[in-house]
């Protein structure tokens, strides 16, 4: 782009680009859940093996979530994010070349390694471009991308499989991330260094960020973060609630095939609906929290109120098993609306509680611990479904968020900026 080109409201274009990356992230990870029925026509994958394969993804995803956040703090958002999405795009394409459970598990593991850096990168980009009063809305926008990718996945992948086969579904979705990387490298830099930002927006953004209290100017050791009760609170609620979320997104298409008897086109017709609810949840929760702040409601209450509403929506999942197909889809949708509303605020808390220089590390630890919780849940739930069906999984997933909200009240007594002390 030429030096003279300026983009008005660049920060909102930036968060839109981040939302698109998040959409690609979820499109790639949802390709297997949607295609699993067709893939099983090529080679056998039992429920237990499917649970283990998902756990391999989650183990790699959670590990790189923490490491990726650390790398983003060290090397910067622009280059770090580009590396992450390039890696996971290639890994996704590799799924199209496997011929057995072992190869599928390996490809899934490699996908998790790349995708683990996605959300820490998004959180860091938002913290670099948005002041406190706009952050929840910005987080809501990029978090909506996850639901957009999941909404697109069922009909898009079903169409690709119908025209070609399941292997091309992985290859074509993987190519999208490589195209995104080219655009990202051309557009992204910090506000102070951007060639595309207008002078007016640059002054407003930099002044607002300078007025935000800051902590240490270099990443702190992970060990030093564990001295803060707020960190333990964030890790605990992520550990519990991510388990329910990943169960919904990985098992919904399979449930529709196994229990409701839908073929690939039927899955494409119905499975996108709950993800659309989830996308609305991301957007509404972020908007509502920012609205409360602008109405001079305290930061603490502006985050707590949307969290409470979201958490107590999840128990609707207890009614899925005995509902008609359309009602079950509605209950799935309400539960996923609730989780994404919850997730938007929880991710914002990292930026509310900690200064920019350590957000990548805190967000990375949150994602790591949350994903390990989901990994353990996935390891167990495949065997549970093999033996007892889906009902126990729906029950457990429905109560995790209300319990987590109560825990957050105990461990995060007030949502306000912590100023970590560098003891190194």
Image (cartoon, grey):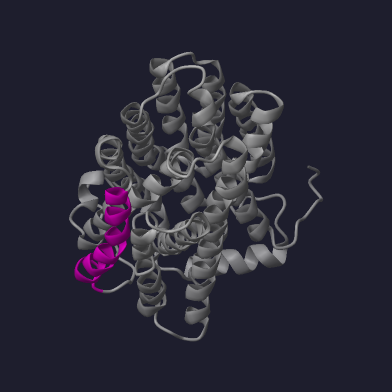
In this view, 137 is above or below 360: below
Give percent across and percent down for residue 318: 33, 60
Membership of 394 in magenta stretch: yes
| Of the pair 284 and 211, the residue shown nearer to us | 284
Give percent across and percent down for residue 361: 35, 47
In this view, 346 is above or below 77: below
| Of the pair 220 and 81, the residue shown nearer to us | 81
Horizontal side of 280 relative to 392 (left or right) equals right
Magenta-drawn stretch, dominant element (helix, strand or loop): helix
Can residue 18 be seen? no
Residue at x 51% of width, y 72% of height: 133
Membership of 166 in magenta stretch: no
Give percent across and percent down for residue 202: 65, 62
Horizontal side of 177 relative to 282 (left or right) equals right
Give percent across and percent down for residue 231: 25, 57
Residue at x 49% of width, y 30% of height: 36
Q: Residue furthest top?
A: 99
In the picture, residue 385 is in which quadrant? Answer: top left
Residue at x 71% of width, y 27% of height: 163
Can residue 421 be seen? yes
Residue at x 25% of width, y 62% of height: 230
| Of the pair 269 and 33, the residue shown nearer to us | 269
Q: Quadrant of the N terminus?
A: top right
Which range is magenta?
A: 391-413
């Amino acid at each position: 782009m030429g030096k003279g080109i300026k983009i008005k409201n660049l920060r909102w274009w930036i968060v839109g680009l981040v939302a698109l990356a998040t959409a690609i992230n979820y499109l790639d990870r949802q390709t297997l859940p949607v295609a699993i029925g067709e893939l099983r026509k090529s080679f056998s994958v039992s429920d237990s093996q499917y649970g283990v394969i998902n756990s391999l993804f989650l183990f790699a995803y959670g590990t790189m979530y923490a490491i990726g956040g650390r790398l983003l703090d060290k090397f910067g958002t622009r280059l770090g994010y580009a590396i992450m999405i390039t890696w996971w795009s290639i890994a996704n394409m590799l799924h199209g070349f496997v011929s057995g459970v072992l190869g599928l598990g390996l490809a899934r593991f490699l996908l998790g390694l790349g995708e683990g850096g996605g959300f820490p990168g998004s959180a860091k980009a938002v913290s670099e471009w948005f002041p406190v009063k706009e952050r929840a809305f910005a987080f809501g926008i990029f978090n909506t991308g996850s639901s957009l990718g999941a909404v697109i996945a069922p009909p898009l992948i079903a169409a690709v499989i119908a025209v070609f086969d399941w292997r091309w579904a992985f290859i074509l979705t993987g190519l999208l991330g490589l195209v995104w990387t080219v655009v990202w490298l051309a557009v992204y830099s910090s506000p102070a260094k951007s060639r595309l930002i207008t002078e007016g927006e640059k002054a407003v953004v930099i002044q607002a960020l300078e007025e935000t209290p800051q902590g240490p100017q270099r990443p702190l050791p992970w060990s030093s973060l564990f001295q803060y009760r707020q960190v333990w609170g964030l890790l605990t609620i992520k550990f519990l609630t991510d388990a329910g979320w990943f169960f919904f997104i990985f098992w919904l298409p399979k449930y529709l095939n196994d229990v409701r008897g839908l073929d690939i086109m039927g899955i494409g017709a119905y499975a996108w609906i709950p993800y659309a609810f989830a996308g609305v949840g991301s957007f509404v929760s972020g908007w509502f929290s920012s609205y409360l702040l602008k109405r001079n409601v305290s930061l603490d209450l502006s985050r707590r109120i949307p969290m409470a509403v979201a958490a107590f929506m999840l128990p609707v999942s207890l009614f899925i098993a005995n509902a008609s197909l359309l009602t079950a889809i509605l209950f799935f949708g309400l539960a996923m609306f609730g989780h994404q509303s919850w997730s938007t605020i929880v991710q914002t808390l990292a930026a509310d509680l900690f200064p920019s220089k350590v957000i990548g590390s805190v967000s990375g630890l949150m994602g790591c611990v949350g994903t390990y919780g989901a990994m353990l849940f996935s390891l167990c739930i495949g065997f549970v479904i093999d033996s007892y069906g889906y009902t126990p999984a729906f029950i457990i997933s429905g109560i995790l968020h209300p319990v987590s909200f109560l825990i957050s009240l105990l461990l995060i007594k007030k949502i306000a900026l912590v100023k970590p002390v560098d003891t190194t």
